[in-house]
Amino acid sequence: MTTSAIRLAEVRTRLDRAAALAGRPAGSASLIAVSKTHDAGAIQPLIDAGQRIFGENRVQEVQAKWPALRDGRPDIELHLIGQLQSNKAADAVAMFDAIHSVDRASLVTALARNMDASGRRPACFIQVNIGDEPQKGGCPVAELPELLTLATAVLPVAGLMAVPPAGVEAAPYFALLAKLARDHGLHGLSMGMSDDFETAAMLGATHVRVGSALFGERT
């Protein structure tokens, strides 16, 4: 097995083990391989090893590297996990299968307009600023009901997404996001990264976003 295949197998095993500890079936949390900033040479081995869901941050990066990687692979999904400017909504709708960073009314409007025009309807996650951090994107918790009312009327809202504050225990923030999702009748929970995806899986994550555990630490 290649290094990439070994890492992928290890992460999948850890993910399924964590889900099982919470009484969830294997495969209940989808693994998103965060391939942002990595070139085709780093991504292809993961595709060869069976990984099919990848996360990217920037529309331009996807346009540059993914047409060739995706050629002949209709089962590959691309998920936008980075902040999205409203003027890039058309590109995002055209290229991504899911958008995890819907966080404001103007973006909801731009995405809905472009979905209506194109006929494509990528799944959308409402990003919540779960730690109330001014430097981060995401809808404030207090404003979530209003944004959800707007978004669910015009977008295929799959659930909620969040990135907890760095350097603190993530579990309370994951639990809060799960409660917010339940309160609003949503199933999808995009939460957990390389350092805490097992905790996220135990607390109900349906999608975890894992980069360095699969690709190695960036230099």
Image: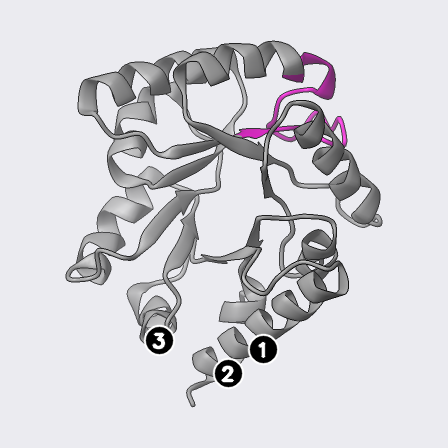
Q: Residue at x 34, y 63 (%)?
A: 39
Q: Is residue 175 left or right of residue 45?
A: right
Q: Alpha-carbon distance for marks 2 and 3? A: 11 Å
Res 60 quadrant in image: top left
Give the prevailing secondary structure in the magenta stretch. loop
Q: Is residue 157 left or right of residue 63?
A: right
Query: Which residues make up the magenta segment?
Result: 126-144
Looking at the rendered structure, the secondary structure element under dot 3 is: helix
Quarter of the picture containing the N terminus is: bottom left
Q: Earlier in the sequence, mark 3 or mark 1?
A: 1
Q: Residue at x 59, y 30 (%)?
A: 186
Against 182, residue 195 (above or below) is below
Whether the residues at callouts 3 and 1 have beta carbons within 8 Å, the answer is no
* Residue lying farthest to the bottom in this orientation: 1
Against 173, residue 1 (above or below) is below
Against 7, residue 101 (above or below) is above
At label 1, the amino acid type is: Glu
Q: Is residue 217 visible?
A: no
Q: Which residue is mark 2?
A: 6
Q: Earlier in the sequence, mark 2 or mark 3?
A: 2
Q: Position of residue 127 (x, y in %)?
A: 58, 30
Label total for image: 3
